[in-house]
Amino acid sequence: MRILIILILYFVLSHPLFALPQRSTSFESLKIAYPDEIKKITARYIIYKDGTRIPIQHSFFLVNWLSTFFNHLDHSYGSISNKDILHEQYEPLFRKMYGNSAKEVEKKLVKIYWMPHVFGKQYPLRVTTINDVDKKLMQVSSELEKLPVQYYKYLEQPASSYYWRNVAGESHLSFHSFGVAIDINLKYSNYWLWDFLKLKKPISDLRYHKIVYQNKIPLEIVQIFQKYGFFWGGNWYFYDTMHFEYRPDLLASSA
């Protein structure tokens, strides 16, 4: 059986449709997305400007390709999305960029106020200064303030910004840990697991049921965040529509 599987994989992956590039477009997008941090990408390493080298695992190419192929969705807001394999496989890259511990990350955090011309100082957020994320989120905030008043209900009472923690049920860090993410109003959000549990079925049933996509967040809000490099969690197969994180590399990869 093992030999049969190997032969099938050999012939399938030899087909031009399955050809893997020498370098992943996801890796190439990193240099474009983070020019102040990353100096170059070689066939073996991601090289930072301070000389730090992070090895590239070539098995990533196949995992990333298959993830994109099988988890891709055509959402109403465009065609973006695979599971965030780049984060799961290369957390050291982002730890190097933003901080390897809560203490390191917190040295680079500043306080900004969310949509202050609408909400005053009700919603202070702690955000990193690395990659000018604080400035970019303030630009998002300013532009959102110009939307018609009916959009404000989605944006008041942001649920979370900086918080050092793992993704729920996972072994890797949430991007909230790096001070580069924000969750907007929970009341108007959809999260795949919460929606699935409403069906009153056990989690074990997930293997038999396709995730049914749900969303209430208006396109106008999503577009403003994306304009400044913030990727929307509503574009993932396992969607999280309240969530935005500074990931210009993902936006470049999905363009």
Image (cartoon, grey):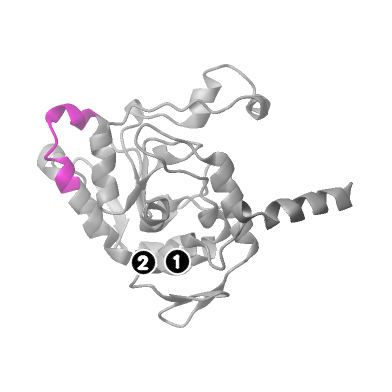
**Residue closest to the eye, 8 or 47:** 8
- Give yes or no for contact between labels 1 and 2 (Cβ–Cβ under 8 Å): yes
Can residue 169 be seen in the rendering of this structure? no
Name the dominant secondary structure of the magenta segment. helix
Query: Residue 131 colored magenta?
Result: no
Q: Residue 12, percent across and down? A: 71, 51
Q: Residue 93, percent across and down? A: 49, 66
Question: What residue does disc 1 label?
Answer: 28
Q: Residue at x 40, y 58 (%)?
A: 249
Which residue range is magenta in the image? 141-153
Tell me the element at label 2: helix
**Which amino acid lies under the numbered mark 1 shown in the image of this protein?**
Glu
Picture quadrant of residue 211: top right
The relative height of residue 204 versus residue 14 in the rendered view (above or below) is above
**Which amino acid lies under the numbered mark 2 shown in the image of this protein?**
Ile
Question: What residue does disc 2 label?
Answer: 32
Q: Residue at x 69, y 57 (%)?
A: 14
**Number of other residues with Cα within 10 Å of mark 1, as a class: few under 14, some 14 to 19, many 20 or more:** some
Q: Is residue 47 left or right of residue 255?
A: right
